[in-house]
Image (spheres, helix red, strand yellow):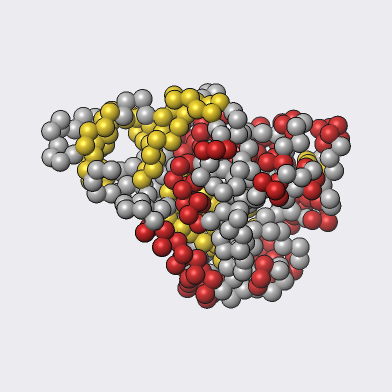
C-alpha cells in the first residue's frame, strides 16, 4: 500500500457537505491532501489508481454490537471483529458492555482498549478500526444498581447502556436524573419482557401460520412511551436502540416534534427482511427484537430516510454454528453483519432507486457518529483518511467461507448481489 496515492475520477460522496461528484482524490500518508475535478498528472512519488465507476465515501460507524472476547472467544475475537469491520467498510466500531466480565468498571474498559491496541502488531501497516466502548449502566448488567458512571466516563467510554431492557421505571427515572451531568449519551432498549412473554416472532398472521410464539408490538411501544415520558420530565438526551415497529416510528416522531432530546436507530436487518422471510426457520433471522411485518419494514425504511430514525445499527451478536443449529424458538437471538450489511443495504435501498447514496451514507456514517455526540468521518481536504471505497457494479455471492468472523450467523448468505467493498482506510 503506497504512502501516497491518487484516486482518479472516483465518485465522491460526503453527506456532511451534501457532496456527490466525480473528482480526483490525493491521499498522502493517511491524510486527504486534495480533492479536485482534475489534479496534476505528475504528482511526485504517488501511485495512480484508476477509480472510475467506484464510489469513495466516509468510513462507516457502527453504533452498537457485541464481540466474543473476552469470555466467548469461540464465537469471535477482537481480531476477527476488526477484520470483519474493515472488510465491510467500517472504520469505527462501538461495543456493548456485554463481555465476560461485563464492562462495568474502569479496569474493564482499560483491559479492552489494551487488547485492541495490540491488534496493530498483527501485520505490518495493518490499522484496525477505531474501537469505542459503551459502559454499563448497571453493575454486572443486572439492571438494578447503578454502575460508577462517573468513573467509567473518566475511563473513556462513549456512553452508557446495558444493551438490555431495564424493567424498573423508577430506576430508569433515577438514571435519567443522574445522567444530566455526565455529558455522554444514554442508550435504552425499550422492551417490556412481561408483555413479550415467550414470543420469538412479531405477532401476526405469519407467526401464527408458522407456529411461532408471537411477540406483540406493544411490548416495544409501551416501554418506549414510558421511557419518553421520563425523558420529558428530566430533559436528559437519550438514544433509543432497536426501533422495530411502525407504531414506534410514530412515537419517536411525536417525541421529536415535542422537542425532546432523542435520537433513535433501527437494526439493518429490519430494513431488508420481515416476517414473510421466516418460512425457512433460518435461525439467523431469530433476532431481538424480532423482524417486523412488511408494514413495519416499510415504516422503518421511511423513518430513516426522513430522519425520524437517525441511524442504522448493525447490533452484531456472534454465535457459534452449534448454538444456532437448533429449533428456531430455542436459538439465541442475534446475527452478525459488519462484513456484508452495507452491500445488502445498497442493493435493497439504493440500487432499487428508493434511496440516494447520500441518504445511505448519512444513516450509516454521519448520523451514527452524531448519535454518539462525535464528529463524523468526512471527505474534505486536510482531514485524515477515514474512508470506504465501494464498487457498486461488481457482482459477488455472499458466502460463509469468505466471512472474517468466527461465527457465520449472517442473514443473506448465498445471495448474489452487485457491489463490493474494495478498500477501507482506518
Q: Position of residue 376 (x, y in %)?
A: 42, 50
Residue 373 appearing in the image:
no
The structure residue drawn at horizontal position 51% and vertical position 45%, both measured from the top left corner, is 404
Q: Quadrant of residue 273?
A: top right
At x 31%, y 29%, the residue is 51
> In the rendering, at what x and y percent does residue 25 appear?
26, 36
Q: Is residue 188 left or right of residue 118?
A: right
The residue shown at (49%, 35%) is 359
On the image, the x and y values in percent for residue 15 come to 42, 39
Q: Is 5 displayed left or right of 75 in the figure?
A: left
Could you say which is closer to the camera, residue 124 or residue 204?
Answer: 124
Q: Nearer the viewer, residue 176 or 92?
A: 92
Asked if one can make out residue 419 in the rendered structure from this viewpoint, the answer is: yes
Q: Quadrant of residue 297?
A: top right
Residue nearest the observer in this picture, 419 or 157: 419
What is the tally of numbered marks visible in this picture? 0
Residue 241 image point, x, y percent: 63, 52
Which image quarter holds the N terminus? top left
Q: Is residue 146 above or below residue 225?
A: below
Q: Residue at x 36, y 59 (%)?
A: 121
Dividing the picture into quadrants, the one containing residue 253 is top right
The answer to whether 182 is drawn above or below residue 297 in the figure is below
Amino acid at each position: 500500500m503506497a504512502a501516497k496515492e491518487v484516486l482518479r475520477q472516483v465518485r465522491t460522496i460526503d453527506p456532511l457537505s451534501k457532496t456527490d461528484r466525480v473528482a480526483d482524490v490525493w491521499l498522502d500518508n493517511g491524510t486527504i491532501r486534495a480533492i479536485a475535478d482534475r489534479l496534476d498528472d505528475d504528482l511526485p512519488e504517488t501511485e495512480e489508481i484508476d477509480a472510475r465507476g467506484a464510489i469513495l465515501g466516509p468510513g462507516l460507524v457502527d453504533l452498537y454490537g457485541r464481540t466474543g472476547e473476552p469470555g466467548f472467544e469461540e464465537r469471535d475475537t477482537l481480531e476477527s471483529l476488526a477484520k470483519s469491520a474493515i472488510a465491510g467498510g467500517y472504520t469505527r466500531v462501538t461495543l456493548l458492555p456485554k463481555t465476560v466480565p461485563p464492562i462495568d468498571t474502569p479496569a474493564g474498559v482499560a483491559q479492552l482498549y489494551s487488547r485492541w491496541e495490540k491488534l496493530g502488531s498483527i501485520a505490518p501497516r495493518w490499522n484496525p478500526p477505531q474501537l469505542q466502548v459503551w459502559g454499563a449502566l448497571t453493575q454486572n448488567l443486572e439492571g438494578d444498581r447503578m454502575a460508577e458512571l462517573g468513573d467509567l466516563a473518566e475511563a473513556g467510554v462513549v456512553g452508557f447502556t446495558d444493551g438490555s431492557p431495564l424493567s424498573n421505571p423508577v430506576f430508569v427515572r433515577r438514571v435519567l436524573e443522574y445522567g444530566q451531568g455526565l455529558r455522554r449519551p444514554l442508550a435504552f432498549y425499550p422492551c417490556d419482557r412481561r408483555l413479550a412473554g415467550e414470543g420469538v416472532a412479531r405477532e401476526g398472521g405469519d407467526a401464527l401460520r408458522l407456529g411461532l410464539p408471537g411477540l406483540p408490538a406493544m411490548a416495544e411501544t409501551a416501554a418506549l412511551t414510558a421511557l419518553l415520558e421520563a425523558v420529558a420530565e428530566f430533559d436528559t438526551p437519550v438514544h433509543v436502540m432497536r426501533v422495530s415497529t411502525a407504531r414506534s416510528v410514530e412515537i419517536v416522531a411525536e417525541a421529536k416534534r415535542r422537542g425532546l432530546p432523542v435520537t433513535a436507530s433501527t437494526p439493518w436487518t429490519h430494513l431488508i427482511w420481515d416476517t414473510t422471510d421466516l418460512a425457512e426457520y433460518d435461525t439467523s433471522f431469530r433476532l431481538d427484537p424480532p423482524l417486523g411485518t412488511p408494514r413495519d419494514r416499510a415504516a422503518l425504511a421511511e423513518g430513516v430516510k426522513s430522519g425520524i430514525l437517525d441511524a442504522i445499527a448493525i447490533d452484531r451478536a456472534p454465535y457459534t454454528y452449534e448454538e444456532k443449529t437448533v429449533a428456531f424458538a430455542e436459538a439465541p437471538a442475534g446475527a452478525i453483519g459488519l462484513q456484508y450489511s452495507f452491500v445488502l443495504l445498497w442493493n435493497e435501498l439504493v440500487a432499487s432507486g428508493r434511496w440516494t447514496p447520500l441518504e445511505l451514507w448519512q444513516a450509516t456514517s454521519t448520523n451514527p457518529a452524531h448519535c454518539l455526540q462525535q464528529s463524523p468521518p468526512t471527505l474534505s481536504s486536510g482531514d485524515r483518511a477515514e474512508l470506504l471505497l465501494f464498487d457498486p457494479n461488481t457482482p459477488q455471492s455472499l458466502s460463509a467461507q469468505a466471512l472474517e468472523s468466527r461465527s457465520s450467523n449472517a442473514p443473506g448468505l448465498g445471495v448474489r448481489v452487485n457491489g463490493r467493498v474494495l478498500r477501507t482506510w482506518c
